[in-house]
Amino acid sequence: GLRYGKVLQLTLAVIKPDAVAHPLIMEALHQKILEHKFSIVKSKDLVWQRQDSERFYAEHEGRFFYQRLVEFMSSGPMRAYILAREDAISYWRELMGPTKVFRARYTSPDTIRAQFGLTDTRNTTHGSDSAESAQREITFFFPEFHVQEWMERLEPSFR
Ligand code: RTP
Ligand code: MG
């Protein structure tokens, strides 16, 4: 249909176990989310079993970092957010910065991973990388949440 003005998007943002272990970093990230005008649609704290981790990262199976990634992501509590904003997906990834922490520090020192990342695996946050991933990942973390229904309940001018 006809679209005009701002188009709202949902993304899945996850605070990984390295950051959840530090209450001050958690607080800083929560503030950053609000400061940048995301709406928090839903959030939850959770711990993955190893098999959840394997399922979520199935696309990376066989890569050299897969085992350590899967291990790390099931090593302790995480916080997951469904975030809404204009351009939420790319905006959140901009705030996170590059995956590799040393690249992040060098090229974009103001980003989350540059400021708080420990290693390329323990890099503080996850963010969906496309509309398709956002849909899949939101459903993975929040099976009871229906993206389509939520969108349909919005004012038409936001869709
Ligand atoms: P994601 O898929 O989680 O959104 O992250 P991304 O696009 O920024 O990075 P990707 O290359 O897809 O890697 C997925 C996750 O694997 C971990 N990783 N560890 N060298 C390493 O130890 C290494 N490389 C990647 C990262 O935690 C990344 O988020
Ligand atoms: Mg990726």
Image (cartoon, rainbow, N blue to C red):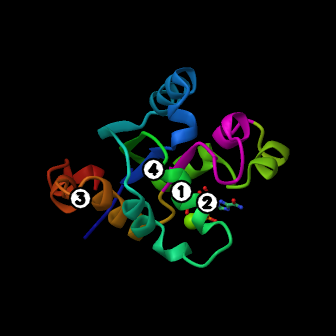
Q: Which amino acid does label 2 sit on?
A: Arg
Q: Earlier in the sequence, mark 3 or mark 2?
A: 2
Q: Which amino acid does label 1 sit on?
A: Glu
Q: Is label 1 in contact with label 2 (beta carbons under 8 Å)? A: yes
Point out the frontmost of discs 4 and 3.
3
Residue 7: x %, y % from top left: 37, 54
- Determine the CA span between mark 4 and mark 1: 28 Å
Residue 2: x %, y % from top left: 28, 67
Q: How crowded is mark 4: few (under 14 residues within 10 Å), some or many (20 or more)?
A: many
Question: Which stretch appears magenta?
Answer: 110-127
Q: Earlier in the sequence, mark 3 or mark 1?
A: 1
10 up-or-down from 20: above or below: below
Q: How crowded is mark 3: few (under 14 residues within 10 Å), some or many (20 or more)?
A: some
Q: Is label 4 in contact with label 3 (beta carbons under 8 Å)? A: no
Instruction: Pick the quarter of the image with the C terminus.
Output: bottom left
Tell me the tag on residue 147: 3
Q: Is residue 14 left or right of residue 139?
A: right
Please identify the quarter of the rendering in which residue 28 is found.
Answer: top right
- Determine the CA span between mark 3 and mark 1: 29 Å
Residue under label 2, please give it.
68
Q: Residues within 10 Å of mark 2 (few under 14, many from 20)?
A: few
Q: Ligand 1 near label 2 (Cβ, under 8 Å)?
A: yes
Q: Is residue 29 left or right of residue 106?
A: left
Tell me the tag on residue 88: 4
- Determine the CA span between mark 1 and mark 2: 5 Å
**Residue lying at 38% horizontally and 64% vertically, measured from the top left:** 51
**Residue lying at 50% horizontally and 52% vertically, measured from the top left:** 73
Is residue 117 a member of the stretch shown in magenta? Answer: yes
Question: Helix, strand or loop at disc 4?
Answer: helix
Tell me the tag on residue 71: 1
Q: In this view, does 51 lie to the left or right of 143?
A: right
